[in-house]
Each structure stands twice: as structure tokens, then as C-alpha cells.
Amino acid sequence: MRDSVSVPAFDHVDSILVIKLRHIGDVLLTAPVFRALRERFPNARLTALVNRGTEEVLAGNPLVDEIIVYDRSIKKLGGMRKLSSEISFLRGIRARNFDMTVDLTSGDRPALISFFSGARYRLAFDPGRRGFFGKRYLYTHLAKQDGRRHTVLQNLDVVRPFGIATADPAVDFAIPAPAREYARRLRAEHGIGADDVVVHIHPTSRWLFKCWNDAAMAAVVSWLLDKGVKVIVTSSPDPKELDKAARILAQVPPDTALISLLGQTTIKELAAIAEAADLFFGVDSAPMHIAAAVGTPVVALFGPSGAFHWGPWDNSAGVDLVGESPYPARNGVQKFGSNVVLQKPWECAPCGRDGCDGSKVSRCLEEITPEEVKAVLAKKLKIQGLGTRTGL
């Protein structure tokens, strides 16, 4: 195993597999790694291995040549069927003759995939004592992980010690023409003009303990409508998220300036909606990361997760690639570029737990007031009488 501070030659690297078997937002934030690999190996074929349902965030990215989708339903198979499916999948990976793997997942399965791929070079964070015994020996190059850094920077930290780097950590998201046309038609159908202020709100997350309380969210939606703002509300088609979003909108007085698209958009269409909006407001979620990636200013509410890890990334803001996170504080209100994170400055936040005392409800989110949020939105949107663009 090579020392993590050496810079290897990496001879004859023609095909590279990047593994990220996590959720949508996690996969999106790997995009800068593909740029680093492309700059270091301009002629190599870059392949992403991701979970089914997450591939859209990398689809169309010119830095990614191929996407392999892992079907997580394999895990639910029993006995020999599961074993047979896993072996078949590994054989398919090995048949592609990858020269290098980059494991950005740090799980046991990706470690085995990396090893059985047969790649000469296998890069990852040093797992230490995490995972099964001997796991670290399945890799050839191990980087040290600094858990205090933003996820975008941590992803780059897997490859940077080995001479694979980029000066441009932008999180790319490709929006196809049909999705942009969808957003254009939506604006036309609802009479949204060029001078209208539009806010895209995605009030839910796959993890409901990351969501604000319904009444507070409804109060902010109602306030924006009262100020003449056009509001587009989206949610995933997941039944729990749909139900929560519907409960929020049920508390908002009817208004033609409110456009509900709950469960109706693809990931690409959601990105196009965010891109065409003046601002995105929501919670720590994949749509928050998507909005930031397409260049829309974000105001996000954070509770049990840390902005220093997961705050919305601003592609146009300067960042020290080897320095601290662009959200350096543990909690509180923080700004990175055009993005603002609101989080209670409590000693216990962020805790990383699924609600307080296992309740699935996060008090640090529940107790953010609508007035606190309105003050920030007013400054970002330059709503008369409630602030200017200066400050935040």
C-alpha cells in the first residue's frame, strides 16, 4: 500500500470507476471529483456507479461518460438469489476492466466492489477500524479524512493527496432542453412575467426530522404571497413527503400566485424550476443542493445536520480547497456566497440524530420562528420595508 502523502505516477489509466452508493444529494456533490479526474486523465473513460434513483443528478454531465446503476432491491433478495445477483453484478464490473476505482462512499459494499473490479489503483479514505476486519487492505491508496470539512471538499480529499486535483470545485448539474421548456411553459401558463419575483419552495426532505413545522412553513408561504411574490411549491412523490406538503398548503389561503406541483416533477424539471426562480427556500435536502448547483440563491433551514458538512454550495464563490469549510461555524446563521443557512445556535446543534430523544421531531428546527425566516427572505428579495439586499 502506498503512503498517502506520495504522488504516484498512475500509468496507463484509461478507465476509472467512481463509486457513490448514497442518496441524491450525496451523489450530486461528487461532481467536482469528476472534473479533477478529467483534468488529471483527459483521455480516460469516467464511469459513475450510483444507486438506482440517484442517476439523474449526473445524467448529461459532460464530465461523466457512463453511469452504472446499482439496484438496491438486490439486498432484499433471500439466500442464494441474493448471492447469485451480487456475484453477477461483480462479474459485470470486473468485465469492464477498470484501471482505477475511486470510492467516495466509505461503505463495506463499495470496498468489495473496488477490490473485485480488478483495478490496479483503488483509492478511498482510510476506514481505520470502521467496517470489516482487513477492509483497508482492499485499497491501494488511502487518504486521511477530515470530518470537519464540507462534503464537496471531503470528496476531493480522497484524490487530492495523490496528485488528482482541480482548482474549480463547481457542482455541475446538467438541465436538458425539455426540462427548461417545461419551466418556460409553466411560467407562461401561470402568467409569470419577467418582472415577477418567484420563490421556489421545497418544504420536505426524505428525512422528516429535517423538516420545519407545518404551521411555520405555511405562515412564510402566506407572507410571501401577501407581498406579491409568486410561489412554486414542490415535493417528491414519496407519500410521506406528499402528505406533509399537502398539510402545509392546506393552511395557506387560496391564491392564484401559488403554484402547487407536489409530486409532479422529475429531478431535471425541479432543477429547471429552481434555475428560473429568484430564490429557493427549503430545508436540508437534495432539492436544496440542486438549486444551489444551478446558481439560484438558497435560504435553507438546518437542524440536526451540520452546515459545515452539508450547507448549500455556491459555485461562483471563492473557496480555499485545503482550508476550512465555507461554513466555518458549528451552528447559527451562516452565509456562503449567495446562500444563507439558518440554524439555532444551540450547544446540541447539530446532533446528527433523527429528532430529539428519538422523537423524529427536531426542536432546533421547530423553534426557528417565521419572523426569523421572513427577515432573511426580505433582505434576499429586497421586499420593501423589510430589509435590503445588503447584509445577507
Image (cartoon, rainbow, N blue to C red):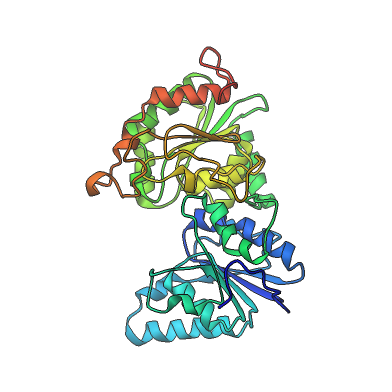
**Rendered location of residue 100, percent (x, y):** 63, 75
- Position above or below: 108 against 333: below
**Rendered location of residue 312, percent (x, y):** 53, 43
Picture quarter with the C terminus: top right
Q: Is residue 213 visible?
A: no
Count the marks: how many?
0
- The image quarter containing residue 190 is top right
Foreground: 164 or 260? 164
- Position above or below: 184 against 7: above
Q: Does residue 133 appear to the left or right of 89 in the view shown?
A: left
- The image quarter containing residue 380 is top right
Q: Does residue 372 appear to the left or right of 320 in the view shown?
A: left
**Rendered location of residue 98, percent (x, y):** 63, 79
Q: Does residue 302 appear to the left or right of 385 in the view shown?
A: left
- Position above or below: 376 against 11: above
- The image quarter containing residue 326 is top right
Q: Does residue 208 appear to the left or right of 200 in the view shown?
A: left
Picture quarter with the N terminus: bottom right
Foreground: 216 or 117? 117
Foreground: 244 or 83? 83
Q: Is residue 278 visible?
A: yes
The residue sitting at 66% across, 53% down in the picture is 174
